[in-house]
Amino acid sequence: MEKTKEFYVVKTGDNLTKIAGMFHVTVDQIMEWNPQIKDRNKIYPDQRIRVAPPPETDGEEGEYEPFPGADFFQASVTSPIIEAMGYRLIEENCSVYSGGPDSTWSSADQKSYAKWQRKLGYGGDDADGIPGKTSWNKLRVPAVYE
């Protein structure tokens, strides 16, 4: 079974109509899958957008990022995994991002992840915003292909 590309990085000259056509989806679907896009006429080069539905959470198997370890989540780390995590946090309504996530670990990532941990029922030191294996696996961050 071939894996469908879930994300696309916007290039100069792209618009949502063109991207929707490339992936055989509608602009409305892209808008639904990307709550960080507020205006269908404003996308930017290097912006990463979802071009396929988010993964199902009903137990259906998919390809997800394995837990990279708690030491991975620090300010010096830049990885597309962090950005993919951020988009999943947005999908779970656990975002404190002002303009959307990027690939560098930030305080917005940590605060958003803390919201996710609280949504799962964690509290105190267990909701510190640093991913742990159990909460990470429940978030189901899609596999990132570079």
Image (cartoon, rainbow, N blue to C red):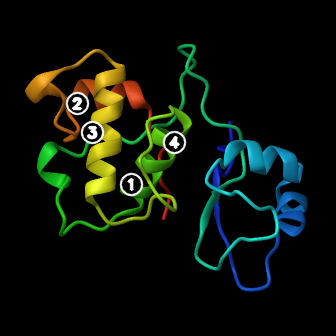
Mark closest to the chain's N terminus, 4 or 3: 3
- Within the image, what quadrant is residue 138 found in? top left
The answer to whether the residue labelled 4 contacts the one labelled 1, judged by CB atoms less than 8 Å apart, is no
Closer to us: 95 or 130 = 95
Say which of marks 4 and 3 sits in front.
4
Residue 33 in picture, x, y percent from top left: 69, 43
Residue 28 in picture, x, y percent from top left: 86, 47
Mark closest to the chain's N terminus, 2 or 1: 1
Mark closest to the chain's N terminus, 2 or 3: 3
Can you say which quadrant of the picture contains the N terminus? top right
Q: Which residue carries the number 2 mark?
A: 133
The answer to whether the residue labelled 2 contacts the one labelled 3, judged by CB atoms less than 8 Å apart, is yes
Alpha carbon separation for disc pair 2 and 4: 19 Å
Type of the residue with mark 1? Ile
Type of the residue with mark 4? Ile
Q: Which residue carries the number 1 mark?
A: 81
Q: Which residue carries the number 4 mark?
A: 90
Q: Which residue carries the number 3 mark?
A: 67
Q: Residue at x 43, y 64 (%)?
A: 102
